[in-house]
Image (cartoon, helix red, strand yellow):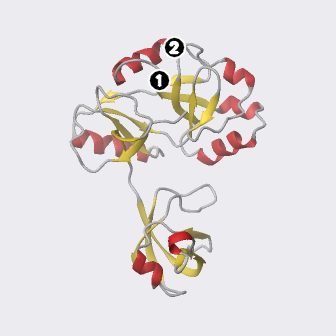
Amino acid sequence: MSVLLAKNWAGSDPAGWWLSEKLDGVRAAWDCRVLVTRTGQPIRAPQWFLDALPKSESLDGELWIGRGQFQRTVGLVRSHQGGEGWRSIRFAAFDAPLAAGAFEERQAALREAVAGGPAFVLPQRRCEGHADLIAELGRVEQAGGEGVMLRQPGSAYERRRSGTLLKVKTFHDAEATVVGYDCGTGRNSATIGALVAQLPDGTEFRVSSGLTDAVRRSPPAVGSVFTFKYQEMTDGGVPRFPSFLRVA
């Protein structure tokens, strides 16, 4: 079951749009029979978890433990073993793909169908404007959250990436040293595919996003320092979604 995917917020007026927290969990969809990932792969949740999900309404949401628990959530979901670890996972539902009507009607259907257990309906409120959006983003990030989401009022559920759903996040900047390169593939087979980078504490990671064709043809020399942006650090101290910005 394909799901609605978000675009990045580009500064448009958010007044009147629905505002909610962006959860750092595992995207999941429930069609009243099976639980799958955003790419349609089955999720082997314990039967008691599946039995507790609503049988009268579809769900689109996140399997979520809490802020800063992304790696733990992924580990439990990918283990395919169920077990007591799933007692800490909840299904945060933010849409009902198979329900009729606009977003507000689908929210009403969610509230009627989700009556407890591991599932809950993610709170939504109207955004009052740009200042309200930035204040809420700051509050969520300060509390350890990933960002916020904006949903266009009256919008339909589209099974594609759509401008009716926008994600708003703040990236962090840092510096790293080039320690090597990965060979490119496909259209980049004649250039580098990624920079192998090292943080001051010795942690190594790879950066492929943000590399222009010119940088791939003539990358920063080994030993040089460059600036990159990232969303957050994993529990192991590795930057999530690093993107090259410039040579420092």
Q: Residues within 10 Å of mark 2 (few under 14, many from 20)?
A: some
Q: Looking at the image, do the residues carrying marks 1 and 2 touch, with CB atoms under 8 Å apart?
A: yes
Measured from the top left, where is residue 200 in percent x and y?
A: 56, 75
Measured from the top left, where is residue 41 in percent x and y?
A: 64, 39
112 or 86: nearer the viewer? 112
Query: Is 128 situated left or right of 54 in this image?
Result: left
Residue visible at 25% across and 49% down?
A: 11
231 or 151: nearer the viewer? 151
Q: Amino acid at mark 2?
A: Ala
Measured from the top left, where is residue 238 in percent x and y?
A: 58, 62
* Residue placed under numbered mark 2 in the picture: 113
Q: Compared with residue 30, is residue 2 higher up or lower down, i.e. above or below?
A: below
Q: CA gap, disc 1 to disc 2?
A: 10 Å
Measured from the top left, where is residue 226 in percent x and y?
A: 45, 78
Residue visible at 58% across and 56% down?
A: 234
Residue visible at 45% across and 85% down?
A: 218
* SS class, disc 2: helix
247 or 65: nearer the viewer? 247
Q: Residues within 10 Å of mark 1 (few under 14, many from 20)?
A: many
Query: Is 53 situated left or right of 212 in this image?
Result: right
State the image quarter where residue 31 is shown: top right
Query: Is 136 situated left or right of 32 in this image?
Result: left
Q: Amino acid at mark 1?
A: Ala
Of tags 1 and 2, which is closer to the observer? Answer: 1
Figure quadrant of the C terminus: bottom left
Task: Return the disc, 1 or 2, that comes first in the chain's sequence.
Answer: 1
* Residue placed under numbered mark 1 in the picture: 96
Q: Compared with residue 222, is residue 77 higher up or lower down, i.e. above or below?
A: above
